[in-house]
Image: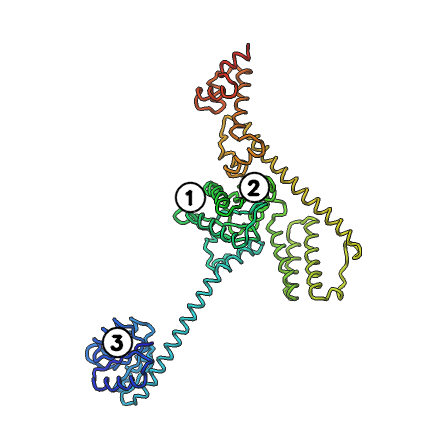
Amino acid sequence: MYRLLMVDDERMIADLLYEYLQLKLEGELELYKSYSGRDAIEIMENIPIDILVTDITMPGINGLMLHKRAKELNPRCSVIFISGYNDFGNIQYALRNESVDFILKSESNDVIYNSICKAIATLDQFFIDEQMQVLTRQQWELSIPILQERLMLSVLDGEVFNPFAFTEIEFPLSVTDKLLLMMGRIDEGYSLTKTALYQLKGTVDEFIRQENQVFSVIHHDDILWLVQPCANNATLTKSNIMSAMGTIHDLCLKSFNISMSMVLSEDYIAFEEMSVTWIGLRQTIKNLRGLSSGMLLIEYDNNKPPGVKADWLHIRNILRQINLSIERLQQEKYEKYYAELMYTLRNAPQHSYSEKMEIVLRIYMAFLSHSNNNGINQEIQFEDYFADENHWELYDTLFAKIAEDFFTKQSQTSFKNTNQILGRLKHYIHDNLCGDTSLNKLAEIAHFSPTYLSRLFKQLTNVSLTEYIGRLKYEKAAQLLVDTNMKIIQISTELGFETQSYFSRFFKKYAGVGPQEYRDSMKG
């Protein structure tokens, strides 16, 4: 219910008008009256007033002063001036300051009543507009996460990055600053419902958000985290996130009973590089698929296949738009995107035969699929490039052979990549026995997290890294003791031992005797 304050220093006029309004507006407004500007201000400062009906000419604080104070206290307060004088200056003031009305006391009370009704209507409209703004804002705020997720998915799928689009939907990360990408994929043999997957994502979000800014999105069944340092934590490093990866893996096992493999981008990247880096992360896991569960990896350039090119991602995005325009029967859009595709192909680097085949077949299959769906396939001459329609066994044979070759090749690639990683690691250890062979250094070389590298090496070789390095150092020490005249302290330093006594204890653990005894026994 709105509140109305009527102010007039002439008590009789004030009382009569108050009684009239009580009869006309009973139950519609809360009515207050005052006989002076000072008392009126005291009322307004204690009670929110929506409509002010005031005489202009009053001693002390007049109606114009009341108008100013009423607007300060409630900018939406409607003000109706009443006056015994047809004063042009006061009328002009009322019009300029958005007052509802200016009424002469000589006019009937009905005129004042009608003006009050006009003020009520204005206030009602204010309220409706305000409610609509609140509702619109609430709906916008509810839609923001959905819009952010859709925009991110479109960029990951190859759509051109548009910083304005991210700013428009209040994206929580700075699009001008670089970030780290981290991807998680549930390992084979484990499964989660979609709801549980979102719960897992939210749990990891909160864990990462303790020290960083984060945005995450689910792409099919993979989770991608975008991580930037907070303003007060600008020292975010890969090592921080690598350590967090191990904790997150353990969290998934304990809280969700699943194993998740994770891969981190090799370095900070710009938003424009997300599509290519995203495919690189997926390829990193794919190349080592089947290696073990719970992989914790670092993406690197050698894991990016030749097909991961910005122009090829753009072409695939155009092909998606072509398929959509065919599905929706939008010929103008089809012609627009087809022209864009042809322009891109003419100006892009040379594409392989298989890439060109993909382009041709995807457009062909879009037309064929939607023709079948729309029942017009009989009216269009689709050429059969593969086999006669009555010989489906040829298709079976063809796809069986392709599937066998595809999965065999993928398995061989994973095995080959694993051997390359182990070979590179062992080669480094052999060449740097006296250098840095710490777990962190080896993890950096292998592009694995330290925790995962230690677990994987033991799984593949049945020997821990510490044992492997220790055995190599022992063999090298034994060879130097027999084949050279180097002093034991020199051999100790050569192999990276801090003290000769520690080297002696180490050597005795393997040989059963100390270095000097071993040398003496071998040289007779």
Find disc 1 in the rendering and name its residue.
Answer: 235
**Where is 167 relative to 49, above or below?**
above
Q: What residue is rendered at 60% in x and 54% in y?
A: 314
**Among all residues in the image, which is located at the extreme left?**
59
Specify few, some or many for label 1: CA neighbours under 10 Å numbering under 14, 14-19, or 20 or more: few
Q: What residue is rendered at 51% in x and 18% in y?
A: 512
Specify few, some or many for label 2: CA neighbours under 10 Å numbering under 14, 14-19, or 20 or more: some
Locate residue 485, reporting x and y percent.
52, 14
The CA distance from mark 3 to mark 1 is: 58 Å
Find disc 3 in the rendering and name its residue.
Answer: 66
Specify few, some or many for label 3: CA neighbours under 10 Å numbering under 14, 14-19, or 20 or more: many
**Where is 479 relative to 439, above or below?**
above
- Locate residue 378 relative to residue 497 in the image: left or right: right
Look at label 3 and name its amino acid. Answer: Leu
- Report the disc number at residue 293: 2
Q: Secondary structure at mark 2?
A: loop
Q: Is residue 109 visible?
A: yes
Which numbered disc, 2 or 3, marks the residue closer to the eye? 2
Locate residue 247, reporting x and y percent.
47, 42
Marks 1 and 2 in Cβ contact (< 8 Å): no
- Locate residue 241 relative to residue 104 in the image: left or right: right
Quarter of image, res 383: bottom right
- Foreground residue among 162 and 395: 395
The CA distance from mark 1 to mark 2 is: 31 Å
The CA distance from mark 2 to mark 3 is: 76 Å
Locate residue 326, reporting x and y percent.
66, 63
Look at label 1 and name its amino acid. Answer: Thr
